[in-house]
Image (tube, rainbow, N blue to C red):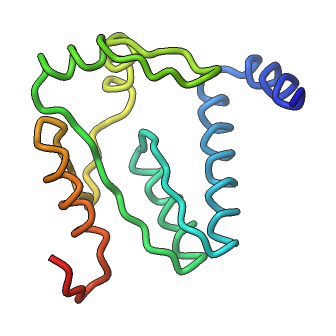
Amino acid sequence: MGAPKPAHAALARLDRSEYLAASLGLLRTLVTRQLMLGQSAVVDDLVTESQVVLWRETAAHFAARLFLIECICSDEVIHRARVEGRTRGIPGWHEIGRDHVERMRAEVPPLTVDRLTVDAIEPVEDNIRRVLDYIAPSGSADG
């Protein structure tokens, strides 16, 4: 798998805005491919209002449903402890610290679009139920 090395070198030469644009473009390409195959896609990413417009356009093109789910932790002390105490352990990815979280909060304005917000201080089972209710087809008898 030597192919990622040239791509990584090319990406490393980009400034931050170019890098973010390339990253979003790649992510949209991957999602588009999933939707072309009639498959679902789940994206875990920070989004801006303008990116939401792009995701809506992509979903509409394939007659797919788009669900925006925002995950927060409303307790700053707990959030800090979780960020500082976790190890993601994703091969080839760096760990993120509190400085990264704060930088992202400063760079990405809060969303104003319709979305479901789940709070990580709530029990996981409650958040799962809220998400399942949110994505259930309209008129579903589940509940």
Q: Is residue 120 above or below residue 56?
A: above
Snapshot quadrant of residue 61: bottom right
Residue 9 percent coordinates (x, y): 82, 19
Snapshot quadrant of residue 23: top right
Residue 27 percent coordinates (x, y): 62, 47
Residue at the image point whose x is 25% and y is 60% from the top:
131
Residue at the image point whose x is 89% and y is 26% from the top:
2
Total numbered labels placed on residues in the image:
0
Query: On the picture, is 83 further left or further right than 123?
Result: right
Residue at the image point whose x is 12% and y is 32% from the top:
74
Q: Is residue 134 above or below residue 70?
A: below
Residue at the image point whose x is 20% and y is 22% from the top:
79
Residue 138 percent coordinates (x, y): 27, 84
Query: On the picture, is 36 further left or further right than 88?
Result: right
Query: On the picture, is 30 further left or further right than 90?
Result: right
Q: Quadrant of the N terminus?
A: top right
Snapshot quadrant of residue 102: top left
Residue 126 percent coordinates (x, y): 13, 53
Query: On the picture, is 125 further left or further right than 12?
Result: left
Q: Is residue 112 above or below residue 17?
A: below
Q: Quadrant of the C terminus?
A: bottom left
Q: Nearer the viewer, residue 4 or 87?
A: 87
